Image (tube, helix red, strand yellow):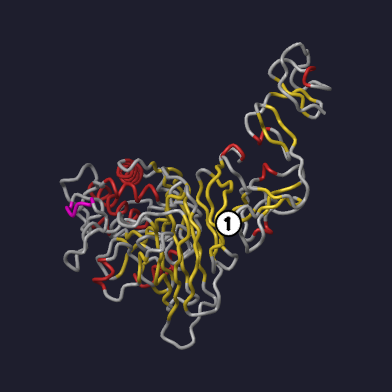
Amino acid sequence: MAIGALGCGGGGADVGESCATVADCASGLQCLDHICRPGCLANIDCGDGRVCESHTCRLVETNIGDSCNAEADCGPGQSCRLPIDAFVAGDGTCQPEGAAGGVVGATCQVDTDCRVGACALGRCTELCEVDSECLRGFQCVGIPRVSSDASSFLGGYYGCLPTRATLTFEVPLRPQLSQPLIIPVVNNATSLVLVAEAAQADERIGVTAVTDPENTSIFTAPTTLAEYFAGALRHKPLAGVAVLQIPSTSAVALRAGVYSMTITSSADRPQVTLEGRRVRVVEKLGPGATLDLHFHFADLTDHPCLPGAPALSPTTAPVDPQFQTVFLQRLRDIFAAANIAIGTVTYEATTAPVELEGLASERAGELFATADDERGVSVFFVRTIMPAGLETIVGGTPGAPLPRTGASGVAIAATALCNNTDPAHRDDPAWDRLARTTAHAIARHLGLYRNREPEPEGADDPLLDSPTSDDNLMYWGEDGGTSLSTEQRQILRASPVLR
């Protein structure tokens, strides 16, 4: 087999024809496995155990146990592996590639789930030193290595992860009331969201302390409402499910490295532990630009605020002129101002129990838990929201960018269409104003807070450039506007809800 320099002319064999040496191939080709092939551009063009050098595939010759820093350092049938739950710089060794397990990019929980390399952020990766050693659509990024029980930071290495993706991985919990966790953040991440779920709806769960990769304390659970609004990072333990997002304010930027977070659960009964609880982390790599919307309709037949027939439903909404040309188009316009396009739009009947169609606010989590949409925002149209007068409920600020949790969506009351009758708005003021209300709720799900709270006085948006005026999308009143500040747009674009 010849794997020398590219052909210099003189050979007559074309691509795909047999060769004994490179001299048999036409100019610009290499002789690889006795076949004339185009010169390589990256290692992926050469196959297992070869690297691309000067457009030519070179065989790598190594023995089991030889040290390595990247997959490209090991020969055919071998992969560069790190020891399980340990790490020292340069600790990789060439080991036999497993016959089973996920390929690079496949989902995983532990290293042994992967055919080569290691499991990082819930995806199989392989060690690398430069981007050209990774598959197309992947890049070589710095990855913090964390023990399998998320209790300690072991060091850092470089591995291949998708250039743009939303990665979700579960963090193991031990049966104790309060537990510190080490959360890895790679250097191409744009946002980090932690979703903590309690075992019982009346149990409070959430993050009570956060230390950033520079070992600086950036969050301690507030004990008063004033402390909550004054915090640079807003979060508090909640009943059932609680969500923490970084970044969510100007003062707390996302940093590569490891975060130390303490998860705590409590309830009004003794001997509560973290057993049966769940913590998942969603990490977004690269900014998003597309928002998918999934509309779920309760039975709106004969609703007094939707006169006429047929009733708004999964069948009629896709062709209803008010819903499409006023409501949905207005949503497109509002988010276009943040360079976010509305992508896939789906329409389904809600699977929630009938009694949730007239939604009591304290039961909203039961409704949101029926959302099974993997990406985007689930928007539930219900008949009413109680107490009377409420037009929307959000699963949280931010909401969970995951399906089937008590924070997985927003609810819109059809009764809002009875109230929105301002003649100053365009053709159909009711649907136009409801679009603004819905956009406000969706933006809260994506991580934006109200620019000014109705109470307590002075509780403003933590973003530095957010105006407190009523022409902003995040103004709390129903007569608010749709403008967004630069930092508000940045927070929206960083949300892992987007794709």
Foreground pick, 104 / 470: 104
Residue 468 is situated, as x and y percent measured from the top left of the image, at 18, 55
- The region drawn magenta spans 465-470
Question: Is residue 136 rendered to the left or right of residue 22?
Answer: left
| Residue 176 sits inside the magenta stretch | no
Q: Residue furthest top?
A: 10
Residue 314, compared with residue 270, is above or below; it is: above
**Residue type at numbered disc 1:** Gly
Residue 193 is situated, as x and y percent measured from the top left of the image, at 44, 59
Q: Identify the element where label 1 is drawn.
A: loop
Instruction: Look at the image and tell me whether residue 360 can be seen.
Output: no
Residue 159 is situated, as x and y percent measured from the top left of the image, at 58, 48
Q: Main secondary structure of the magenta part?
A: loop
Foreground pick, 47 / 322: 47
Q: Residue furthest bottom?
A: 270
Number of callouts in the render? 1
Residue occupying image coordinates x 68% and y 18%: 28
Residue 21 is situated, as x and y percent measured from the top left of the image, at 81, 22
| Residue 467 sits inside the magenta stretch | yes
Which residue was labeled with disc 1? 122
Q: Quadrant of residue 249?
A: bottom left
How packed mark 1 is, by other alpha carbons closer than 10 Å (few <14, some 14-19, many 20 or more), is: many
Residue occupying image coordinates x 51% and y 73%: 277
Residue occupying image coordinates x 74% and y 20%: 15
